[in-house]
């Protein structure tokens, strides 16, 4: 057959209260991406930033025949990650202050590190998926909120045995003190990178502040407590993204629109775009990402892992 694009869910109502919604994703082809497209109308009393709208996608979980869930990541972290697999995040950028004005944004759940290239042999194998689960947070930003879920992939006569698919490991915590070390255990076949969130990032530091009092001071990848990558600071990511990440999403006050929902997001790349074997081989090893706090606050570390 070849390329496949199919609707999984169309115009499903979300509502404004917290809820969990699931969709079946047991496909008879190799799935490359799930597209979660969200629509609504600006609420009259809303603060009305698209960052708030994106944050209403609390968690995205992928349940498979291997584990339920096998992959977990916050919606905001997924939005900020997309550019690292070559997808420029989409959101409506018109004025945010008009009551009832239509708004929308899109997320992708990638199963391949190369969603723009169907010839690369990665993706969720046929019959492996079970459900795609989204925790929606109570949201007063958008009225009449609905979503579409679309899958893209390729038929098994062309791609019968993919080399692996992406899963996210979510580690959310609040560091207790400056210099505190947190270890995020990583399991899978190959470690591709880490999608991180720090509440305090460089551009919000006070005048004359030291540059190492961001939420994450530094990270390292450990194999059995031995450093194999790092230590490195968050600033390593500044020159590694596919798109500039120094700008936020548009806001009611105007200004230039960026492509991240918060400036505390950064991706640590361990070889996700390699032309040969991707990332670091971790199967059968004791692997941790060690994160050192620059300030005590909420932090998220999301290892991006290839599994078979």
Image (tube, rainbow, N blue to C red):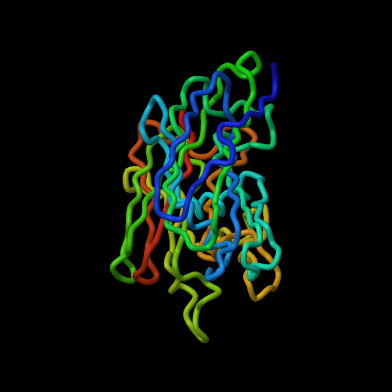
Residue at the top extreme?
A: 157
Identify the residue at horizontal 43%, vertical 27% (top origin): 130
Up/down of 196 relative to 22, above or below: below
Q: Based on the displayed image, in which of its 4 quarters is residue 49 positioned?
A: bottom right
Up/down of 221 relative to 115, above or below: below
Q: Quadrant of the N terminus?
A: top right
Residue 55: give x, y in percent of width and height: 49, 58
Up/down of 227 relative to 124, above or below: below
Relative to 126, is 249 on the left or the right? right
Q: Based on the displayed image, in which of its 4 quarters is residue 54 positioned?
A: bottom right
In front of the other: 214 or 157: 157
Relative to 91, is 293 on the left or the right? left
Relative to 186, is 208 on the left or the right? right
Residue 143: give x, y in percent of width and height: 54, 58
In front of the other: 44 or 129: 44
Residue 93: give x, y in percent of width and height: 69, 62
In front of the other: 9 or 239: 9
Q: Based on the displayed image, in which of its 4 quarters is residue 163 positioned?
A: top right
Q: How many marks?
A: 0
In front of the other: 138 or 218: 138
Residue 60: give x, y in percent of width and height: 46, 44
Identify the residue at horizontal 32%, vertical 57% (top origin): 182
């Amino acid at each position: 057959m070849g390329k496949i694009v199919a609707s999984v869910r169309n115009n499903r109502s979300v509502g404004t209260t917290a809820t969990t919604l699931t969709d079946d994703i047991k496909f008879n082809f190799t799935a490359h991406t799930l597209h979660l497209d969200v629509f609504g109308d600006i609420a009259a009393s809303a603060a009305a930033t698209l960052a708030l709208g994106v944050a209403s996608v609390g968690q995205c979980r992928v349940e498979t025949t291997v584990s339920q869930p096998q992959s977990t990541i916050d919606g905001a972290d997924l939005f900020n990650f997309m550019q690292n697999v070559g997808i420029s995040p989409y959101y409506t950028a018109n004025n945010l202050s008009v009551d009832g004005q239509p708004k929308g944004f899109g997320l992708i759940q990638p199963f391949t590190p190369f969603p723009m290239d169907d010839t690369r042999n990665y993706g969720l194998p046929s019959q492996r998926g079970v459900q795609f689960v989204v925790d929606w947070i109570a949201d007063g930003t958008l009225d009449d909120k609905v979503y579409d879920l679309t899958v893209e992939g390729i038929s098994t006569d062309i791609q019968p045995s993919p080399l692996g698919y992406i899963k996210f490991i979510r580690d959310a915590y609040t560091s207790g003190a400056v210099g505190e070390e947190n270890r995020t255990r990583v399991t899978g076949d190959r470690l591709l990178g880490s999608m991180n969130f720090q509440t305090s990032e460089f551009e919000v530091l006070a005048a004359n502040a030291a540059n190492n009092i961001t939420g994450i001071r530094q990270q390292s990848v450990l194999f059995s407590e031995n450093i194999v990558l790092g230590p490195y600071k968050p600033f390593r990511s500044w020159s590694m993204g596919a798109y500039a990440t120094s700008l936020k999403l548009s806001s009611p006050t105007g200004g230039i629109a960026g492509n991240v929902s918060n400036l505390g997001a950064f991706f640590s790349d361990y070889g996700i775009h390699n032309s040969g074997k991707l990332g670091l081989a971790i199967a059968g090893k004791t692997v941790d990402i060690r994160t050192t706090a620059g300030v005590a606050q909420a932090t998220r570390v999301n290892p991006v892992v290839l599994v078979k």
